[in-house]
Image: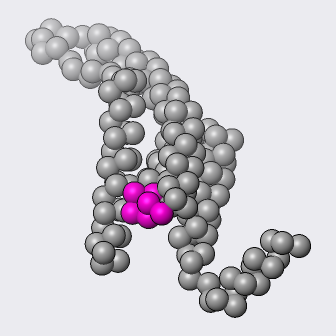
Amino acid sequence: MNSFIKLLYSLLIAVSLVMFVGFSIASVYEPPKPPDYSHPFKENVTPEDQERQHQEYEQQSKAYETAQKDYQRDVTYALLPISIAVLSIGIWMMRRDSEVVGEGLALGGVATSIYAVITSSMADARILRLVAVVILLAGTLLVAQQRFQDTLTPTAKTKARAKKKR
């Protein structure tokens, strides 16, 4: 099969996987609803009532921001093991001569870990963000190593095998 077509199918699998994971999480675990800032139209609204409504809205906004950060943190907790599992399955499949599907799943696992980095940043969770970046780096290195290990010259392959035997 043409290598460009293989790449397109791998990318299609990766994008489809990330969309599946994202929509699945959003379907099962709904995000918090933002506060409604609607002023009832009344002719005799006092400035005190307007101020009270504004203060209530500010309180609701702060509660929403807190709930949003908690939601993003929880989503990150769900994304990290999913990205590790999909990445592992993809690399395993790449080794089992299922190149296109394996590469697509592996790239999908890397993309899912990028998604986890974004959600952990939105949650302002520094340790969780560090874990997500470590998984992203490790996954990227593993996929690149697996994908391009076949490009070694025959002498380099022989040297690599000799090192393993020692």
Q: Position of residue 94 (x, y in %)?
A: 50, 61
Q: How many marks?
A: 0
* Quarter of the rendering containing residue 91: bottom right
**Membership of 43 in magenta stretch:** no
Q: Is residue 46 left or right of residue 73?
A: left
Q: Position of residue 41 (x, y in %)?
A: 12, 15
Identity of the residue drawn at 33% across and 45% down: 19
Q: Is residue 96 above or below residue 154?
A: above
Nearest the camera: 103 or 29?
103
Identity of the residue drawn at 32% across and 36% down: 23
Q: Is residue 56 left or right of residue 74?
A: left
**Membership of 98 in magenta stretch:** yes
Nearest the camera: 129 or 93?
93
Farthest residue, direction right: 166
- Picture colour scheme: one colour
Mark yes or no: residue 33 visible. yes
The magenta span reads: 97-103
Q: Is residue 165 left or right of residue 139?
A: right
Quadrant for the N terminus in the image:
bottom left
